[in-house]
Amino acid sequence: MPGTLNIKPECPMGLESKIIKFDPNLRYGEEFKKFMVKIEDTGDIDIQIEEVDIPQRFKKLLQGNKKLRDTYSIKNRPGLKDQTGSGYDMALVNILIQNNFNDSEIGAIVRSSKTGKGLKATKQYLIKTISKGRSFEVKSKQKFNPRPYSEEILREYFLRSDLLKRFWIYKNKTGLWNDRAEIFLDSMLRKRILGRQDYKVYCVREIIEDLRGLTFQEEYPKES
């Protein structure tokens, strides 16, 4: 965008973006289509950013989360497709959304990052980046249907839920019912479902709730 800084690893100070030529008749050729980026609709998500201090819990999270450190403190995410400062800012925003930081907190953390635009990140830039991250989260959750997963699990396991909200699974090896079905399903489903950590957590929760409804009985299962 004209007037903004284009920051690259080889030019950390940035160069001002300028329009060098305007011709409405110019069009990209067919050979450039593979490089085109899909423009995502951020919908009606309202992003509110105020001046706040970086919360203490972020500092604690940073100490124990290597992925966060590799995104915030040093550029050590070789798997990221976009290795620019903007790419690391987007990756950082995604992690912060997963950990339930609010928009103002995310803005303060992104501006303090060592790997992205840092203090050069404008409020407009932060709003756009955070909006994109939250839009992805909302769209992902809207598309998810737990029923196919539930039906597949019920073909493999015997499950029951009761009035006391206990969730039971039948163990073939012991011939006994165990009320730790939710723990077992949580671990198993996280391995099966691909995607971001927050998306996995959401999907697992939806599947387990669907299974509870499908297997509900008023009384707990009796041993046969």
Image (tube, rainbow, N blue to C red):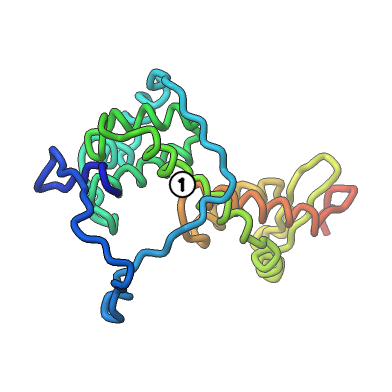
Please state the horizontal and vertical placement of residue 150, each as a whole percent of the image.
Answer: 69, 63
Looking at the rendered structure, the secondary structure element under dot 1 is helix
Most foreground residue, 14 or 99:
14
Question: For this rendering, which residue is in front, 37 or 164?
Answer: 37
Residue that numbered label 1 is attached to: 133
Q: Using residue 67 as the reference point, say whether residue 173 is left or right of it.
A: right
Q: Residue at x 66, y 65 (%)?
A: 153
Q: Residue at x 90, y 48 (%)?
A: 218
Compared to residue 26, the image places residue 132 above or below, namely: above
Q: Work out whether residue 168 or residue 93 is closer to the camera in this orientation and state it.
A: 93
Residue 189, image x, y percentages = 56, 57
Position of residue 222 in the picture relative to residue 31 (left or right): right
How many residues crowd mark 1 within 10 Å: few (<14), some (14–19), many (20+)? many
Which residue lies at the image location 44% right of the left edge and 38% below the top edge? 127
186, 2: nearer the viewer: 2
Q: Amino acid at mark 1?
A: Gly
Residue 139 location, x and y as percent? Answer: 57, 55
Q: Residue furthest left?
A: 10
For the point 15% across and 44% down, the residue is 15
How many marks on residues?
1
* Quadrant, the C terminus: bottom right
Q: Is residue 102 left or right of residue 16?
A: right
Q: Pinpoint residue 187: horizontal percent, then vertical percent.
A: 54, 52
Question: In this view, which residue lies farthest toward the right?
Answer: 218
Compared to residue 10, the image places residue 126 above or below, namely: above
